[in-house]
């Protein structure tokens, strides 16, 4: 065991002597985490969406303002007119809205489609618009009973009625599925999984290929160290490297990005360490099979990018077709993200990730055995 530890510690020391290593280990993944976190962020909770809507209030009276307040109460994300291009739908309050409502006449509120917007967002907006209209009519009816005339209702009276606590409370929730991971809760696990695999595969494979070409491995074999000890030492050093990257991004995610790790931190760390074992073993395996360092690097980059895309590192698998969701369960990144999203986005406990962790351990054991079998000096 001592020889394994010595080999691993020495590899880690040599790695951190290279300045460019810090860029690929920390800077590049961190940039992608921030970029994809902002690109995939969404307003409100992922399971209670607030699609953006543009409201054009052409009414000069107080009813337009009151209606806007009711729309906000019903869960509308009201956009500033300068951001109209991001709106999913638009609503227009007519010019004579206040006069017609107080006169007891019908007044039509416009509801318009925006090109390129999702139909799911439109359905949510339409439901909340109907709820806002029903609520506004109810408030008007209650205010009119106090003045005995609808025309005498004032803005202060109507807002006082709206501020009165409702004796009946409706608790509405989305049913039938879990929330789609978004924001940093999606980008941090996805990029950490992809770059952890990429870095360990590239560094492990390129190091083994270079040391075999330079005769370093043959010189090490002169000493009383076995082939299996040498393989395990290389894998152990790569796992230490992966542990450094894991700790860095979990700390940044917790304190800089607000990712809620909570009581699930030990399970998150265990999942990532087992994934690190998989990536380290695959890296040593590739470096043992291929002799040229450039081929090792190219193959590892291509393989890690494909595993990242198919495993759900680039987009939530919940939005992917069933075929891609099944393919994700054939590669380590898919199982790793399945476990991490259960822990980070869905708040599950360790029992929910036992199966993914065991499957990852199976990948690691298989890659470890193959690396030991095909390792060449």
Image (spheres, helix red, strand yellow):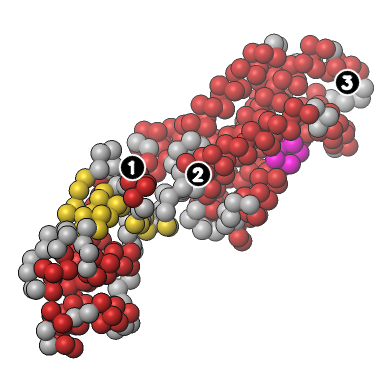
Mark 3 Cα shell of 10 Å, populated few (<14), some (14-19), many (≥20) = some
The residue at which mark 1 appears reads as 85
Marks 2, 3: nearer the viewer: 2
Q: Earlier in the sequence, mark 3 or mark 1?
A: 1
Residue 107, image x, y percentages:
11, 63
Marks 1, 2: nearer the viewer: 1
Q: Report whether residue 375 is seen.
A: no
The residue sitting at 12% across, 88% down in the picture is 148
Mark 2 Cα shell of 10 Å, populated few (<14), some (14-19), many (≥20) = some
CB within 8 Å, label 3 to label 1 = no
Rounded to the nearest whole Å, what is the CA distance between mark 2 and mark 3? 48 Å
The residue sitting at 74% across, 16% down in the picture is 209
The residue at which mark 2 appears reads as 38
Q: Report whether residue 181 is seen.
A: yes
Rounded to the nearest whole Å, what is the CA distance between mark 1 and mark 2? 18 Å
Residue 205, image x, y percentages:
70, 22
């Amino acid at each position: 065991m001592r020889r394994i530890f010595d080999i691993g510690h020495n590899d880690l020391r040599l790695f951190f002597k290279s300045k460019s290593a810090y860029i690929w280990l920390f800077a590049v993944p961190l940039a992608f985490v921030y970029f994809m976190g902002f690109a995939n962020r969404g307003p409100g909770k992922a399971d209670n969406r607030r699609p953006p809507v543009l409201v054009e209030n052409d009414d000069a009276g107080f009813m337009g303002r009151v209606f806007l307040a009711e729309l906000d109460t019903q869960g509308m994300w009201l956009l500033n007119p300068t951001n109209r291009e991001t709106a999913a739908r638009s609503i227009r309050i007519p010019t004579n809205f206040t006069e017609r409502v107080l006169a007891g006449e019908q007044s039509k509120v416009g509801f318009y489609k925006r090109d390129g917007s999702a139909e799911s967002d439109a359905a949510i907006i339409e439901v909340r618009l109907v709820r806002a209209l029903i609520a506004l009519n109810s408030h008007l009816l209650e205010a009119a009973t106090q003045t005995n005339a609808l025309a005498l209702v004032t803005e202060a009276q109507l807002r006082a009625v709206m501020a009165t606590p409702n004796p009946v409370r409706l608790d509405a929730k989305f049913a039938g599925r879990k929330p789609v991971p978004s924001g940093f809760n999606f980008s941090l696990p996805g990029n950490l999984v992809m770059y952890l695999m990429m870095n360990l595969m590239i560094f492990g494979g390129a190091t083994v290929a270079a040391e075999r070409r330079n005769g370093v491995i043959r010189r090490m074999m002169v000493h009383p160290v076995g082939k299996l000890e040498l393989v395990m030492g290389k894998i152990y050093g790569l796992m230490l490297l992966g542990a450094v990257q894991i700790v860095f991004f979990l700390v940044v995610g917790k304190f800089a990005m607000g990712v809620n790790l909570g009581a699930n931190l030990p399970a998150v760390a265990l999942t990532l360490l087992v994934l690190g074992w998989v990536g380290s073993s695959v890296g040593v395996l590739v470096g043992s099979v291929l002799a040229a360092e450039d081929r090792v690097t190219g193959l590892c980059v291509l393989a890690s990018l494909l595993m990242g895309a198919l495993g759900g590192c680039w987009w939530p698998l919940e939005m992917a077709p069933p075929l891609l969701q099944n393919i994700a369960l054939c590669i380590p990144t898919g199982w790793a993200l399945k476990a991490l999203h259960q822990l980070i986005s869905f708040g599950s406990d360790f029992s929910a990730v036992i199966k993914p962790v065991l499957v990852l351990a199976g990948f690691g054991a298989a890659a470890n055995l193959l690396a030991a079998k095909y390792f060449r000096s």
